[in-house]
Structure formats: C-alpha cells, structure tokens
Amino acid sequence: MSRARVVHTSGLGPAEIAEIRSLMHAAFDGDFGDEDLEHGLGGIHALVRDPGDDALIAHGSVVMRRMLHGGRALRCGYVEAVAVRADRRRAGLGGLVMDELEAVIRGAYDLGALGASDDGEALYLARGWQRWRGTTSVVAPDGLRRCPEEEGSVFVLPVEAPLDLDADIACDWRDGDVW
C-alpha cells in the first residue's frame, strides 16, 4: 500500500524538485513549464512513491494565496501540480494526495481553491469541491481584471468563509496563469 509523504518545499532537494517537474511534464503532455512549477512551490507537498522502486508516482501541493470575495481578502489554500503517473492512474493515488492537501487546507485556510483540468474535474467533484458558478477575476498590477477563460474550471472547498458561488472571486496576481 502506498503512503503519501507530506513535506514543505524547504524539505525538498533539487533532485526531488526535478522529479516533480518530470512527473508534471509527462502528466500534462509537455504543457507544464517553469512558471507552472514555480506556482507549486513554497507550500506543502504530498508525494507518493512506488514502494518497489521508490519512483515518484503522484504529487500535489497546496500554496497560500489571497482571494478577494464578498469584500474580504480570504486566506486560500490553492492546490497546484496534482498528477499521477499514467501507468498508476485510477488506483486511488490522486485521492491519497488530495486527502493530505485537504487536511492542510481545513487546518490552515478560509477556503481551498484550484483550477481543474478536464481530466481532474471528476476527482474534485467526488470529493466535495464545488464548481465556482460566478465570475473570476485577478487583482492585477493595473487593477481588477476579469478572467472569463477560467470560468467553469475553478473549484472551491469551503472551510470557514461564507461563499456565494454565484458572485465574483478574484485571485492575487502572479506571473503565468493567474488561476
């Protein structure tokens, strides 16, 4: 039985970060760049290794972001870089990773949020994440900017903060994909 190791980015060495990047690159068919990796660093990681050969087979991280909603700046545990190696999918490893990340979110944040891929939606919905039905925006250097291309793919995990899923939610600015 596989188990997840939970560790802050500071506890990862360069070799493990390279393994994470390699897993993400393969899982997203080469569409995972340096900015995407950067988004997943600086928080808590859940890593699952193959008990036979110690290869990294699943990963996810949760990083702190700020979300603006209902006139409040909320502390958000934002899920990044979730993937399972192709030959190990549909064996519960994504759920194992999410168990650990959700525990961090519930223990430290007002809400959880993530931008889901089409392949990941079913996992998140089955775990109680809710699709954001309202508009999405970013607090950009030049002011509040709508992100209509993200609408329908943002999911939230309510924890402490009251959320109106039909209203606007805005994330903090970052380079690359803001959601």
Image (cartoon, rainbow, N blue to C red):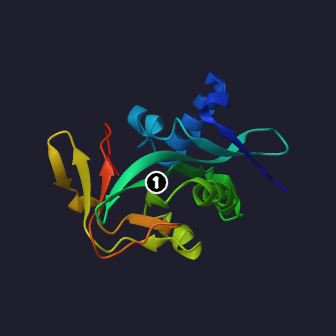
Q: Quarter-wise, where is residue 17 in the image?
A: top right
Q: Is residue 19 left or right of residue 113?
A: right
Q: Is residue 139 above or below residue 14?
A: below
Residue density around tag 1, few if under 14, some if 14–19, many if 20 or more, within 10 Å: many
Instruction: Say which residue appears at 36% left-offset and 70% top-offset.
Output: 132
Q: Is residue 81 above or below residue 137?
A: above
Q: Is residue 3 left or right of residue 25?
A: right
On the image, the x and y values in percent for residue 2 come to: 80, 53
Closer-to-camera residue (30/17): 17
Closer-to-camera residue (47/50): 47
Q: Quarter-wise, where is residue 162 in the image?
A: bottom left
On the image, the x and y values in percent for residue 44 come to: 61, 43
Instruction: Say which residue appears at 50% left-offset and 41% top-offset.
Output: 40
Q: Quarter-wise, where is residue 153 in the image?
A: bottom left
Q: Which residue is mark 1?
A: 76
Instruction: Say which residue appears at 51% left-offset and 66% top-offset.
Output: 160
Q: Amino acid at mark 1?
A: Cys
